[in-house]
Image: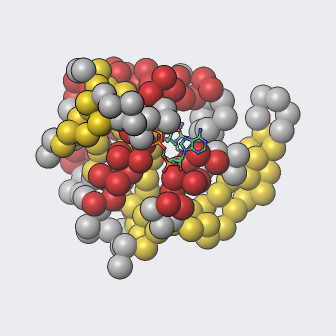
Amino acid sequence: MRKNYRTKNNQCFVVRPVTKKDLPALVDILNSVRAERKFVRSEKIATLEQGIKSFEEFTINDSYIWLVAEIKGKVVGESKIWRGDGKEHHVGYLFLMVASEWRNFGIGEVLLRHVLTQAKNYEKICVIPFSTNLVAIKLLQKYGFVEEARRKKQYKLSNGSYVDEVFMAKWLF
Ligand SMILES: CC(C)(COP(=O)(O)OP(=O)(O)OC[C@H]1O[C@@H](n2cnc3c(N)ncnc32)[C@H](O)[C@@H]1OP(=O)(O)O)[C@@H](O)C(=O)NCCC(=O)NCCS
């Protein structure tokens, strides 16, 4: 389902389900997020082959939700929820990212809102931001996510500082 929105500076953007054609752009955005070195654990370069593999895993899963935001034909962000295994079957894991040049325009909020409205067959949605990721934490709190636990100083950044891993969750019923 495609839906049109406007950014805070009045540009049109579309939120729609991902397609295989979006993967090169998504891999590029993921690599730039990793290169910022302050939002996600992995520092490895993601490859298109890995992107295709995860797309194929997602598409055979009965209830994955994977959306992209597109501005003038260019993919600028994604939100996705994938199901936990086994006894975590009622749980969805959330990931959200927006290309750095398109942040603070309201796109991340729309992607979050949109993915949550489609997450009807999950009971609980989990997300694990760094404690220093105040933008993500504030946005998640605005949509009802609360901190459940944290692993202290779980990550050490390239500048030598430590950050906690924050386990946030939202119950959907
Ligand atoms: C987290 C992220 C997806 C947010 O996307 P975004 O498009 O920049 O966010 P939005 O513009 O929709 O802002 C949504 C809310 O976030 C908060 N926010 C946004 N920018 C902010 C800033 N610079 N400072 C403080 N809060 C900010 C505000 O609460 C805002 O709501 P408001 O407009 O009502 O105040 C984006 O920053 C991102 O991709 N970060 C890198 C990847 C990442 O950290 N992913 C999350 C891992 S869990």
Q: Residue furthest right?
A: 160
**Residue at the image position 54 percent from the left and 29 percent from the top:** 33
Q: Is residue 118 left or right of residue 30?
A: left
Residue 10 versus residue 72 in the image, above or below: below
Looking at the image, which is closer to me, 41 or 5? 5
Task: Please indicate whether residue 34 sits to the left or right of residue 19 in the image.
Answer: right
Residue 121's spot in the image, x, y percent?
26, 68
Of residues 97 and 141, the one drawn nearer to the viewer in this rendering? 141
Residue 149 position (above or below residue 127): below
Q: Residue 73 appears at what percent x and percent y? A: 23, 21
Query: From where the camera sits, is residue 46 visible?
Result: no
Residue positioned most to the bottom = 173
Q: Quadrant of residue 36?
A: top right
Q: Relative to 33, is 163 on the left or the right?
A: right
Q: Residue at x 42, y 41 (%)?
A: 106
Q: Quadrant of residue 150?
A: bottom right
The answer, for residue 20, to whether it is visible in the render is: yes
Q: Image height check: is 122 above or below 59?
A: below
- Residue 120 figure quarter: bottom left
Which residue does the image show at 59% across and 53% down from the upper left?
Answer: 137
Position of residue 36 relative to residue 137, above or below, is above
Left or right relative to 164: residue 2:
left
Residue in the picture at 81% in, 44% down: 162
Instruction: Assign the C terminus to one quadrant of the image.
Output: bottom left
Marker count (numbered): 0
